[in-house]
Image (cartoon, rainbow, N blue to C red):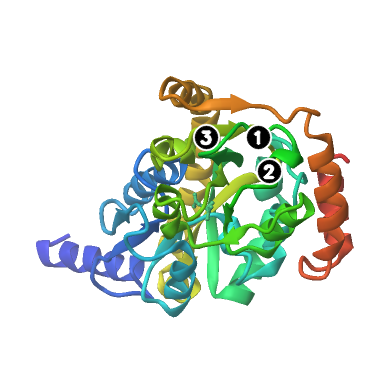
């Protein structure tokens, strides 16, 4: 083969690799809602290294942590419109745009990390991914496992629903989570994630809920004192790509995105198992005080499941969808 033929062959190979997208190498931008050190960041970093290795350095991935590219809710619209490539965000912040993913946020449906993994890597995950493409113009390519959302506040130990009464609690702008707190007897304050630290710092709200790893990465120990170990929502935080961006890529690049997403999902699952207990100890060392619900969470569970589940059957696609999820989980 002459030098010219070899060059032509490699040029052709390169152009077929990029077919459908730009002929030039692209740097994909990934918005990350949380700070460096978070579960989101860890998963996104693994996605970056896996994807870049698969495309042999022909594309790059840049990560932008801490909501630099907009609030989590805003990044859905940006990805959908094609002005942002990827975003890593809590699934509860996708629900307003694609209500069926709400099944993952219904209180006390997911009871362990294993159950979360079983759902999102199986048929349920496939169906929800198809639904987000249809409803919101974004495709889920991988999942972050962040742990149960525990309740934090700056005022006092919370052990019972009665203790909760006097507190102002921030929740995501998610109807299911709002309804959960209403079932527990208070009206929470819906607020964008990007505004939450400042609101806690300034006392606009007293508390919020998020997993241990998020509380730590976001430095909430500086503005919160108490933690209650509730387990109403297991936090899943997908990486999404704008469907228009995805469709523009060659089959090879699409496959690299999906495979990197699957690898990052597995990595995230292991990372959480290896990390959460250490983070909890670190938060205690920083002065946070941890309580358990006094009744083993019985009243919290009974009130939330009775009042909240039926209210959202329609939005998740019917009661049969929840039944199918529970059957998958052997319940
Ligand atoms: C939220 O509370 O809005 C999110 O769960 C925060 C996050 O992305 O970690």
Label 1: state its secondary structure: loop
Please report contact status of discs 2 and 1: CB closer than 8 Å, yes or no: yes
Residue in the foreground of this view, choosing between 323 and 213: 213
- Label 2: few (<14), some or many (≥20) within 10 Å? some
Please report the residue visible at 44 percent of the width from the left and 44 percent of the height from the top. 43
Q: Is residue 104 left or right of residue 321?
A: left
Q: Circle 3 is placed at which residue position?
A: 212
Q: Circle 2 is placed at which residue position?
A: 164
Q: Circle 1 is placed at which residue position?
A: 158
Label 3: state its secondary structure: helix
Looking at the image, residue 197 lies above or below residue 243: above
Foreground disc of the pair 3, 2: 2
Where residue 217 appears, as percent x and y from the top left, is 40, 39
Cβ of mark 3 under 8 Å from ligand 1: the answer is no
Residue 83 tag number: none
Cβ of mark 2 under 8 Å from ligand 1: the answer is no
Quarter of the image with the C terminus in it: top right
- Label 1: few (<14), some or many (≥20) within 10 Å? many
Where residue 115 appears, as percent x and y from the top left, is 72, 39
Please report the residue visible at 79 percent of the width from the left and 54 percent of the height from the top. 183
Among numbered discs 2 and 1, the one appearing first in the sequence: 1
Q: Which residue is most to the front?
A: 166
- Picture quadrant of residue 30: bottom left
Q: CA distance from mark 3 to mark 1?
A: 16 Å
Q: CA distance from mark 2 to mark 1?
A: 6 Å
- Picture quadrant of residue 170: bottom right
Q: CA distance from mark 3 to mark 2?
A: 20 Å
């Amino acid at each position: 083969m002459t030098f010219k033929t070899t060059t032509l062959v490699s040029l052709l190979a390169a152009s077929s690799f990029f077919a459908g997208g730009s002929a030039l190498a692209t740097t994909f931008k990934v918005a990350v809602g949380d700070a460096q050190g978070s579960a989101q960041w860890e998963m996104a970093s693994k996605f970056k290294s896996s994807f870049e290795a698969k495309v042999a350095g022909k594309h790059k991935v840049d990560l932008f942590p801490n909501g630099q590219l907009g609030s989590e809710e805003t990044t859905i619209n940006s990805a959908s419109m094609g002005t942002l490539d990827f975003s890593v965000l809590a699934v509860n912040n996708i629900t307003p745009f694609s209500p069926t993913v709400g099944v993952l946020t219904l209180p006390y449906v997911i009871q362990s990390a294993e159950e979360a993994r079983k759902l999102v890597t199986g048929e349920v995950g496939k169906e929800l991914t198809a639904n987000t493409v249809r409803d919101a113009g974004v495709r889920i390519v991988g999942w972050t496992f962040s742990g149960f959302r525990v309740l934090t506040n700056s005022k006092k130990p919370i052990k019972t629903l009665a203790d909760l009464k006097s507190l102002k609690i921030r929740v995501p702008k998610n109807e299911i989570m709002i309804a959960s707190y209403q079932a527990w007897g208070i009206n929470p304050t819906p607020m964008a994630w990007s505004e939450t630290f400042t609101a806690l710092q300034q006392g606009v709200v007293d508390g919020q809920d998020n997993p241990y790893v998020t509380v730590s990465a976001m430095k909430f120990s500086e503005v919160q004192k108490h933690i209650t170990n509730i387990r109403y929502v297991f936090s899943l935080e997908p990486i999404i790509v704008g469907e228009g961006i995805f469709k523009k890529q060659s089959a090879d690049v699409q496959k690299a995105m999906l495979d990197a997403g699957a690898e990052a999902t597995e990595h995230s699952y292991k990372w959480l198992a290896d990390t959460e207990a250490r983070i909890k100890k670190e938060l205690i060392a920083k002065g946070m005080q941890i309580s358990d619900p006094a009744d083993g969470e019985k009243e919290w569970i009974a009130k939330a499941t009775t009042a909240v589940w039926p209210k959202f059957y329609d939005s998740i696609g019917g009661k049969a969808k929840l039944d199918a999820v529970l059957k998958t989980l052997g319940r």
